[in-house]
Amino acid sequence: MELKRWPRKNDPESIRERQEALGLDGGVTGIDLSPFVTAQEMLTGAAVTPVSVVGPLEIDLGEYELEEPFGRVSETGRSRDHVFVPLGHTEGGLSASLYRGARAAAESGGFRTFVLGDRITRASCFVCKSTEEAVQLARFLDAHVAEMRRWLTEREEPWISKFAKLREVETHVVGPMCHVLWAFTTGDACGPNMMTRNAYALNTGYVMEQAPVKPERAILEANMGGDKKPSHRYFERGGHGKTVLAEATLTEEAVRRVLRTTVDDLLELSFAGTHGAVASGMQSVAFTPASAIAAIFAATGQDLGMVGTSSMAHGTGRRVEGGIHCALRLPGLEVGTVGGGTIFPYARTWLELMGCAGAGKVYRFAQIVAAATLALEISASAAMATAGSENFFRAHNERGGLR
């Protein structure tokens, strides 16, 4: 059988040729694809995901800016807002559960959120002739961070990004390999493309031309970072995405009436779940953060491949006078409000709903994602904490359907 060359372009003729070759009908092709021709290669159709809107989430939000030249996140003020959150998913019970957690928090004073850090990293590697040369290279890079920052800003190549600013360089030598973590900030874009271009420029330009040793090979990404997968380093220290905290202090009345459980039951679940996570070697200490994060990502045009890193989470629960303090740390939340999939009409509409579209909004968006994730953690935990976890079973049995 002779294989026909597959059309790869995204012009109308190539799109139609692919659809006809596959025998696709209007279920996936009866959508105007013109807004998506720059989204990916070999565009053939569209998958429609239903979107619910949950809220309002009552949130005390921080306002932040980056201090130059080191890129520290500085809080400049705080504001209180009521936010409706879009969730793109097909998971029965998810929207109702997140709403329940948001309601319990609202009746207890709402959520409070913080942004601690902002970095995006590319984990390159230089393979040298010997360990001695790898050590020489590491010492050179450690000593020339300011020079490399200046070198990048002075470059005139149009493909080098002026928005991806080099902040730190961290080296790790093992054998003849010098691993290098290039740490950038990228403004309101999530930034993987722009920081990849700048890391490539540093690897092939600055290092190869100015380092005292000549590496045998430069590898742009050598897997020491946390790009699109959980990483113990970034779970512990942050540094790949936004490091965000969310907290809420729930009253005993809200726990009893809205969540239909007790503080004691929630703490018992926390005790068992934390030790279960430790026993399994789980990267996170949390219940179901990926469900909320993936649903918001799908609605707002985020890179779905980044759900793995972004949903690393560490949740805590502690009894306080009159209730329970619940908190969540997301050390590597990879989000953007410009560029990528955020440019598509549906994504921009949902971002606008939250007041998060365009420049100057990424820290607000990161905090809303964190608050929504904590809302789901609270509600799902409450369902599991009931006797025999009956509420959790009933939610999946009744809302998930029988298959």
Image (cartoon, rainbow, N blue to C red):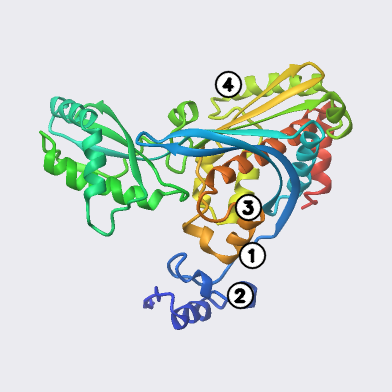
Alpha carbon separation for disc pair 2 and 1: 9 Å
Instruction: Decide if residue 343 is on the left or right side of residue 191.
Output: right
| Circle 3: element type | loop
Residue receiving disc 4: 278
Q: In the rendered structure, which amino acid carries the disc numbered 2?
A: Ile
Residue sitting at the far bottom: 13
Alpha carbon separation for disc pair 3 and 1: 24 Å
- Compared to residue 44, the image places residue 276 above or below, namely above
Alpha carbon separation for disc pair 1 and 4: 38 Å
Q: Residues within 10 Å of mark 2 (few under 14, many from 20)?
A: few
Q: Which of label 3 and label 1 is nearer to you?
A: 3
The mark that comes first in sequence, 2 or 3, is 2
Q: Residues within 10 Å of mark 4 (few under 14, many from 20)?
A: few
Residue at the image position 16 percent from the left and 34 percent from the top:
128
Alpha carbon separation for disc pair 4 and 3: 38 Å
From the top left corner, tell me how far across and down residue 193 is, in percent.
38, 52
Q: Which mark is residue 48?
A: 1
Q: In the rendered structure, which amino acid carries the disc numbered 1?
A: Val
Residue receiving disc 3: 355
The mark that comes first in sequence, 3 or 1, is 1
